[in-house]
Image: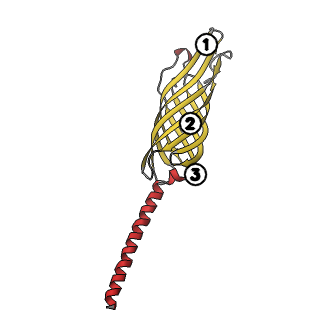
Amino acid sequence: MILKKFKIYFSLVCLLLVSGLGSAQSSTSEAENSETINKRLYYSAMIGFMPGSQDDDFENSGLRGLNIINFMIGHRFNQYAHLGAGLALDIYDMGLYSFRLDFRGFILKEKNVNPYYSLQTGYGVAFDLNNRWDDRLELKGGPLIHPAIGLMFNTHKAGDILVEAGYLFQKAARNDPDRQRFDDILYQRLNIRLGLIF
């Protein structure tokens, strides 16, 4: 009788241990998968390519559309709302430094591949590439907006990989008094970006 009760208790203990281990492994996996989207502070760094045409009168050694760097730092309020700010450098037929606000969110939770949405808005400051243009030439930046969608690949390490496609609208202006020419410019570029988020 005692041996029978012992076997029953032993079986129950083994069953509880197995179920406990399974839950622990599941919790660990979920924690790893959601590590990036659960952190309060986030950092992201991206580079991109923005194919497009340019004005031949102001050619700049063939650089037609590059997002050289896009660095953001911000706060995660929850899975769907992340708000940050940062700096970016874009190259067209002129260069533009921009200060940007960054809003993003993740659609799914606890997934190794997680789709996300992103919206950046800000203001660009123009500069002359290679200092090859006349000193009288005036370059001006303007507001920008950049909606995008992408995928985050969870690496289970310090940083996760971002692959993104978006469309950038950037206002700018160029005034050439010698030619009596004023260009009011709206750059519209598809932006394919790759980066990391921490």
In contact (CB < 8 Å): disc 2 and disc 3:
no
Tell me the element at label 1: strand
Tell me the element at label 3: loop
Residue 69: assigned label: 2
Disc 1 marks a residue whose amino acid type is: Phe
- Residue 57, placed above or below residue 197: above
Mark 1 crowd level (few <14, some 14–19, many ≥20, 10 Å Cα): few
Q: x and y percent of residue 26 in the render? A: 42, 62
- Residue 153, placed above or below residue 10: above
Residue closest to the eye, 164 or 56 = 164
Disc 2 marks a residue whose amino acid type is: Ile
Whichever of labels 1 and 3 marks the residue nearer the N terminus, that label is: 3
Q: Residue furthest right?
A: 135
Residue in view at x 53 percent, y 36 percent:
119
Residue closest to the eye, 175 or 102 = 102
Whichever of labels 2 and 1 marks the residue nearer the N terminus, that label is: 2
Mark 3 sits on what residue?
Answer: 40
Mark 1 sits on what residue?
Answer: 182
Q: In this image, 61 relative to 108: left or right?
A: right
Q: x and y percent of residue 67 in the render? A: 53, 32
Whichever of labels 2 and 3 marks the residue nearer the N terminus, that label is: 3
Q: x and y percent of residue 55 in the render? A: 52, 17
Q: Quadrant of residue 5?
A: bottom left
Query: Between marks 1 and 3, how big is the CA–CA gap?
Result: 46 Å
Mark 3 crowd level (few <14, some 14–19, many ≥20, 10 Å Cα): few
Residue 195: assigned label: none
Q: Residue furthest bottom?
A: 1
Residue in view at x 64 percent, y 20 percent:
139
Q: Quadrant of residue 137?
A: top right
In contact (CB < 8 Å): disc 1 and disc 3:
no
Query: Between marks 2 and 1, how big is the CA–CA gap?
Result: 29 Å
Residue closest to the eye, 129 or 141 = 141
